[in-house]
Amino acid sequence: MKNNLILLFLIFSNLSLFGQYNVKTVNRPDGITLKYFNPIPVAITKTHEVGLSIYKSVENSSYLLSVTVLFKSTNPKELKGNLLIQTTGNKGISLKPVMHKLININGKNVASSMFLLSKRDVQELNLKPLKLVSFYVNSLIVGLTVNKNKDVLIKEFSLL
């Protein structure tokens, strides 16, 4: 009986874990169809909360990484420049922005940026858990240790 209860607990905990990874689809007015996920928190500190999610173009199978930053102690500021990511692998990743803007999510103003992923970036992020995420605010770099959902991108790539 005890083994059955443990098995049921493991099954339900795994189902609820994957429940947050719902693939969504949007058909944009320009004819492009994107599959994507809502941002999942990866770094939470007293001053910032960072969420990541993958977007995939159905037409050409290109990938974008979305970064959403909640500024907890100051007014939100638009991100600038490249996004720097360190995984558990040996190579860091520097992603060039496609766009930076301030948006409103659930009544909170946040900074949102999109970055195009190369094949090399996809290979690294698909295999290695995250360690560090760094971004630029004005001319200052903000580096945050990933302390939650280190394998979020691996899981998202597996579902697209």
Image (tube, rainbow, N blue to C red):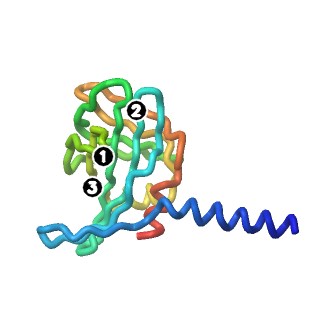
> In the image, what residue occupies the spot 26% across and 50% down?
114
**Foreground residue among 141 and 104:** 104
Q: Residues within 10 Å of mark 1 (few under 14, many from 20)?
A: few
The residue at which mark 1 appears reads as 105
The residue at which mark 2 appears reads as 48
**Foreground residue among 158 and 24:** 24
Mark 1 or mark 3, whichever is nearer to me: 1
Residue 77, compared with residue 64, is above or below; it is above
Name the quadrant of the N terminus. bottom right
Describe the element under mark 1 as helix, strand or loop. strand
**Residue 94 screen position, x and y as percent:** 33, 44
Q: Is residue 96 left or right of residue 72?
A: left
**Residue 149 screen position, x and y as percent:** 52, 49
Tell me the tag on residue 116.
3
Mark 1 or mark 2, whichever is nearer to me: 1
Q: Residues within 10 Å of mark 3 (few under 14, many from 20)?
A: some
> In the image, what residue occupies the spot 45% across and 46% down?
41
Q: Is residue 31 left or right of residue 81?
A: left
> In the image, what residue occupies the spot 31% across and 69% down?
25
Describe the element under mark 3 as helix, strand or loop. strand
Q: Is residue 26 left or right of residue 6?
A: left
* Nearest to N terminus: mark 1 or mark 3: 1
Q: Are marks 3 and 2 in contact (CB under 8 Å)?
A: no
Q: In 3D space, how far apart are the residues under numbered discs 1 and 2 (Cα atoms)?
A: 15 Å
Mark 3 or mark 2, whichever is nearer to me: 2
Q: Is residue 130 left or right of residue 65?
A: right
Q: Amino acid at mark 1?
A: Ile
Describe the element under mark 2 as helix, strand or loop. strand
**Residue 51 screen position, x and y as percent:** 40, 46
Q: Amino acid at mark 2?
A: His
Q: In 3D space, how far apart are the residues under numbered discs 3 and 2 (Cα atoms)?
A: 23 Å
